[in-house]
Image (cartoon, rainbow, N blue to C red):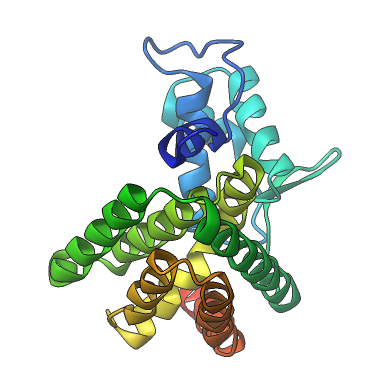
Amino acid sequence: MAGYSSLLRDSRPRVRETNAPKRTGVTVNDLYDQLKEMAVLYTIRPGERVNELELAEKFEVSRTPLREALNRLVAENLLTFVPNRGFFVRELNRQDIFDLFELRRSIEASAVQLAAVRADVKDIRALRKFWKDVMKNKAELAPATELVRRDEEFHVRLVALSGNNEMVRTLYGINARIHFVRWVDIEQRGHDAFSEHLEILDALESRDATRCRELMEGHVTSRMEEIAKVVDAGVVKLFSRG
């Protein structure tokens, strides 16, 4: 079975390296990464049309590779495409967010249950060290976006311990679509200690699959209970910019 590090490396969605951009050194994947960052952080507001001409000028590329990267984001449900109108940023939708959190809970609970059987103890301890270092340095992790990234990394690495490549791939997609909501959540409640993470790792190291599943389900559910308020706050924050 492939180790969790190889799963992380192989599961990240990429786009084909065709129609190379005009600017030397910039690949379609570079464009994809930068556009995805803009989409998950709502640099372009929900519901707004993506201005392809402005983006092509901003990145100094032709429209062909730009469209390839944009179409990839459509496939990942970060953008929508309307014929004869163009690309649009997906709007925040309460039901979509709830659905994604339910999917996340199902995947992570199943993955950690598998990890209790399959994970190498060295990988579990490495993940524990990673999270303890995050918590030790959390005061230096500013803005909240950075703590969200570290939290996402923890959960992806945890799911990778299951040895299931498709679970890791799916979680990447979910994280992208709920990233903004989780960022607003952390900004609202501050940099709380994520003690549940260490409890999950304790159960994992004890090979208690049932306890692992229970803890993960509770961990994700506790955040779902605040999602409605977080989405509302997120919309307010977005439309009060500038």
Residue 64 lies left or right of residue 2; in this view the side is right
Instruction: Work out whether residue 227 can be spotted.
Output: yes
Residue toward you, 127 or 134 = 127
Q: Viewer-proximal residue, 206 or 219?
A: 206
Residue 11, compared with residue 196, is above or below; it is above
Q: Looking at the picture, does residue 91 appear above or below residue 199?
A: above
Of 195 and 209, nearer the camera is 209
- At a point 47% along the width and 66% down the height, the residue shown is 207
* Looking at the image, residue 101 lies above or below residue 179: below
Place of residue 197 in the rendered image (x, y in percent of width and height, measured from the top left): 37, 72
Whole-percent x, y for residue 150 in the image: 33, 59
Position of the C terminus, as image quadrant, is: bottom left
Judged left or right of residue 95, residue 184 is: left
Q: Quadrant of the N terminus?
A: top right
Q: Is residue 101 left or right of residue 54?
A: right
Q: Position of residue 179 (x, y in %)?
A: 50, 62
Q: Residue at x 51, y 40 (%)?
A: 35
Query: Residue at 66% across / 27% down in the picture?
Result: 67
Residue 44, can we see it? Answer: no
Which quarter of the figure has residue 63?
A: top right
Given the current orientation, which residue lies at the most extreme right position? 83
Say how many tags the image has.
0
Whole-percent x, y for residue 33 in the image: 47, 36
Q: Please report the residue visible at 59 percent of the width from the left and 54 percent of the height from the top.
A: 171
Position of 159 with respect to 193 (left or right) is right
Q: Is residue 225 above or below residue 47?
A: below
Residues 46 and 29: in front is 29
